């Protein structure tokens, strides 16, 4: 199914979920208004307050199964045998959707019971109780039922397209296209399709959140091949300064080889012993050459860094801070993703003329596109997404 059709079907399913909730609302109100006591109301509304209405045996289970089948209709597969991968993926989608539906049903059951008991204890009449119960069901419809329908329809569409693309067309990467009015989170991560992800990197595979309408486009090229235009001219743009002497070249080669950690540890501890003193001197020499013989970014640039932890005490949006160390960054988001593993991805907004050192020609690790920032560069936190372990910061000049 095309992406536009998937979004249209998501809205249709949302309306169907909403209609089911309206039917429940009318049923709850009717039964409540005809009840003269709490015991009578409890008996009449037992199918909503004693059991989950959406699970097996529930009063609305059959209707919910029909709605889930509409959601699952988006999971269409080409060339995959029934009972194989297609059914496995459908099972995952169905279980995921039913999980959210079950939780909503449990909350409805518990909340309706609590509202009714509290209302009777306050001597409200059946009509007043019905209004409070009506508000509860309406709230669930607006905040959760329609969101589940939209989100899970898009999930079914995106996951089935993913399986088809990977197994049938040999896709190696994907990008994500956001809606024109997408949320800041999706806009920040996906950049409306300008960044490609490795086909096996599902950390940020949409939907990221309820009501997410982002869709996926696939490519048989690798993420690096699709993204290489972002940094293909870096060698010519940032050549090494001829004033950097051989000792400094050796120090830089040591840093970009396997010694960045001990050098930065020495910088942070200010060379407290004779071993770290040597690394401290190397770090200071590199830093001096960044400041005196390094590069300046030719334009506003996005740099990336991946690390196992954030190493910031009480991070807050708008807070300024600095690291007493050299900071290795990359022009390539894919490289940063490789380094972060299960840790944090840092997006660094670096303004034009930001000082640093592009060291690709000196690194044994080719295609890392490393740009070293000097000690005590100051940063400001712009956005934090703790769930995604994603932070956006800006260099302050």
Image (cartoon, grey):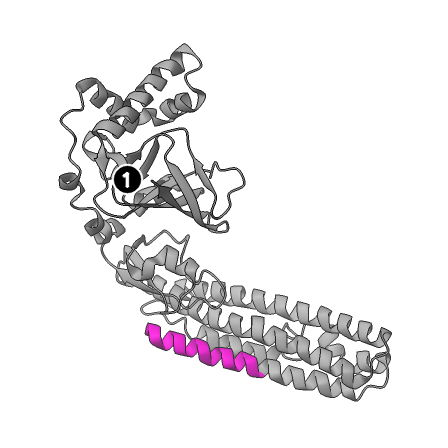
Question: Is 346 rendered above or below residue 25?
Answer: above
- Where is residue 224 shown, x and y percent of the image? 24, 49
Q: Which residues are magenta?
A: 1-19
Where, by quadrant of the figure, is residue 296 drawn?
top left
On the rendered structure, is 111 left or right of 332?
Answer: right
Residue 113 in the image: above or below residue 229: below
Q: Is residue 1 visible?
A: no
Which residue: 41% across, 73% down?
74
Magenta span dominant secondary structure: helix
Q: Residue furthest front?
A: 397
Query: Is 182 or 114 nearer to us in this picture?
Result: 182
Q: Is residue 219 visible from the viewing direction of this image?
A: yes
Q: Secondary structure at mark 1?
A: loop
Q: Quadrant of the C terminus?
A: top left
What x and y, as percent, mark residue 133?
A: 71, 78
* Residue designated by label 1: 354
Residue 267 is left or right of residue 386, and the answer is left
Instruction: Pick whichever, 276 or 38, lies toward us.
Output: 276
Of all residues, the one furthest to the top in this rendering is 274
């Amino acid at each position: 199914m095309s992406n536009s059709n998937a979004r249209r079907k998501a809205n249709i399913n949302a309306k169907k979920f909403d209609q089911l909730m309206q039917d429940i609302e009318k049923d709850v109100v009717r039964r409540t208004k005809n009840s003269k006591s709490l015991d009578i109301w409890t008996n009449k509304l037992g199918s909503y307050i004693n059991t989950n209405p959406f699970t097996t045996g529930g009063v609305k289970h059959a209707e919910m199964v029909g709605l889930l089948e509409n959601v699952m209709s988006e999971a269409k597969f080409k060339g995959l045998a029934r009972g194989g991968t297609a059914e496995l993926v459908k099972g995952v989608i169905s279980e995921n959707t039913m999980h959210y539906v079950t939780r909503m049903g449990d909350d409805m059951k518990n909340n309706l019971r609590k509202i009714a008991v509290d209302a009777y204890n306050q001597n409200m009449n059946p009509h007043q109780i019905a209004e409070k119960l009506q508000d509860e069901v309406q709230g669930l419809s607006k905040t959760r039922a329609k969101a589940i329908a939209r989100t899970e329809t898009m999930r079914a569409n995106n996951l089935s397209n993913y399986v088809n693309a990977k197994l049938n067309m040999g896709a190696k990467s994907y990008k994500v296209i956001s809606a024109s009015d997408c949320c800041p989170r999706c806009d920040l991560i996906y950049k409306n399709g300008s960044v490609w992800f490795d086909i096996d990197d599902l950390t940020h595979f949409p939907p990221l959140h309820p009501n997410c309408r982002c869709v996926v486009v696939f490519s048989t090229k690798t993420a690096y091949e699709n993204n290489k235009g972002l940094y293909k001219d870096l060698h010519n743009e940032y050549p090494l300064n001829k004033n950097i002497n051989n000792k400094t070249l050796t120090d830089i080669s040591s840093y970009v080889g396997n010694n960045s950690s001990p050098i930065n540890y020495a910088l942070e501890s200010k060379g407290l012993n004779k071993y770290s003193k040597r690394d401290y001197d190397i770090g200071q020499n590199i830093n001096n050459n960044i400041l005196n013989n390094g590069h300046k970014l030719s334009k506003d640039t996005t740099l990336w860094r991946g690390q196992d932890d954030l190493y910031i005490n009480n991070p807050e949006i708008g807070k300024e801070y600095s690291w007493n160390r050299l900071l290795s960054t990359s022009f390539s988001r894919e490289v940063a993703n490789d380094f972060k593993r299960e840790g944090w991805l840092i997006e660094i907004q670096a303004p034009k003329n930001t000082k640093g050192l592009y060291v690709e020609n000196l690194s044994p690790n080719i295609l890392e596109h490393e740009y070293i920032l000097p000690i005590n560069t100051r940063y400001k936190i712009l956005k934090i997404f703790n769930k995604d372990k994603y932070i956006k910061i800006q260099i302050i000049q």
